[in-house]
């Protein structure tokens, strides 16, 4: 893990140095296949690099953006309290159960803000670029923006399907057009497994939350002292009173 900053710097240098604006760059490839760049060639091995300038939106430009985002967004992984705050704010704003949002994030990205799927979905709630654009999310790797946009999209699906959570989750995973085509959950193994996983995790979180709430509300039971069994005692006989004689004088 300690080599990540070095790798980031290396990749940025490799991509940026040959295409620095208004700077003549020279390059040569050594016997090991390593490319060397300089703006002040000291020998004849270096040749002028006539590579065209990087275009905005080009694959190189996208690579640089991804490297910079991934190197600067590690805070989200180290600050679960911040993610929890973003989730609860989005839940309150869009009226979605925060535990459902957490279950979706768990299934989509395992709480990795830098996750990218093979299909191109990005960030915590795995927004496709087209969906992110429709939601106004300009940076899907920004944790707060991703959670807000993903929650808003989930809310729209819940409203569309009258709070039918399985249908909404199926549409989130496979797309609303497929849910409409099949009149419900599409017959895809991946979608069925996804819906089952999210609902199972959601129910587990709800149960844990309910148990915590009950534990807080339940009064502390005071220990009841055990009563000792009563024992019958026989009173001791009172000592006999001393007999006293009263002597009265005789009358004369």
Image (tube, grey):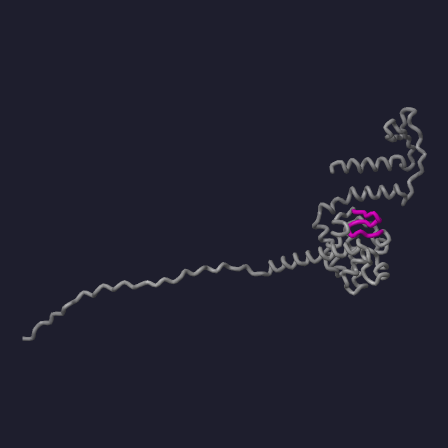
Residue 82: x %, y % from top left: 72, 50
Q: Residue at image x 90%, y 37%?
A: 19
Point out the residue furthest to the left here. Answer: 252
| Residue 120, percent from left and from top | 84, 48
Q: Residue at x 76, y 56 (%)?
A: 195
Residue 164: image quadrant is: bottom right
Locate the C terminus and report the quarter of the image it occupies: bottom left
Give the quadrant of residue 205: bottom right
Q: Is residue 81 visible to us here? A: yes
- Give the left or right position of residue 234, taking residue 62 as reference: left
How many numbered discs sit on the rendered protein? 0
Left of 55 or right of it: where is 231?
left
Percent of width and height locating residue 102: 73, 54
Q: Nearer the viewer, residue 125 or 24?
A: 125
Which residue appears farthest toward the bottom when viewing the image? 252
Q: Is residue 133 magenta?
A: no
Is residue 149 visible in this depiction of the protein?
A: no
Q: Main secondary structure of the magenta part?
A: loop
- Please report the residue visible at 79 percent of the width from the left and 65 percent of the height from the top: 162
Q: Which residues are magenta?
A: 115-128
The quadrant in which residue 40 appears is: top right
Image vertical order of residue 242 relative to residue 78, above or below: below
Q: Is residue 162 left or right of residue 235?
A: right
Query: Considering the image in quadrants, where does the N terminus appear?
Result: top right
Instruction: Depth check: give the residue in front, 20 or 230.
Output: 230
Residue sitting at 86 percent across and 28 percent down?
A: 32
User: Magenta span has 124?
Assistant: yes
């Amino acid at each position: 893990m300690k080599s990540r900053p070095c790798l980031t710097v290396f990749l940025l240098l490799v991509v940026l140095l040959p295409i620095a604006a208004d700077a003549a760059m020279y390059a040569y490839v050594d016997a090991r296949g390593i490319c060397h760049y300089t703006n002040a060639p000291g020998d004849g091995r270096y040749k002028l690099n006539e590579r065209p300038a990087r275009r905005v939106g080009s694959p190189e430009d996208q690579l640089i953006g991804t490297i910079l985002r991934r190197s600067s967004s590690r805070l989200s992984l180290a600050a679960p309290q911040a993610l929890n705050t973003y989730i609860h704010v989005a839940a309150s704003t869009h009226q979605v159960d925060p535990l459902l949002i957490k279950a979706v994030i768990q299934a989509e990205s395992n709480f990795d803000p830098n996750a990218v799927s093979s299909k191109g979905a990005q960030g915590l709630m795995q927004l496709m670029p087209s969906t992110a654009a429709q939601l106004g999310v300009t940076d899907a790797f920004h944790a707060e923006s991703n959670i807000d946009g993903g929650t808003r999209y989930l809310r729209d699906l819940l409203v569309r399907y009258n709070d039918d959570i399985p249908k909404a989750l199926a549409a989130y995973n496979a797309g609303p057009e497929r849910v409409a085509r099949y009149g419900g959950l599409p017959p895809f193994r991946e979608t069925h497994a996804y819906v089952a996983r999210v609902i199972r995790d959601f129910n587990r979180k709800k149960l844990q939350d309910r148990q915590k709430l009950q534990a807080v509300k339940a009064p502390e039971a005071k220990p009841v002292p055990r009563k000792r069994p009563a024992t019958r005692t026989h009173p001791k006989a009172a000592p006999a009173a001393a007999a006293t004689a009263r002597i009265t004088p005789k009358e004369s």
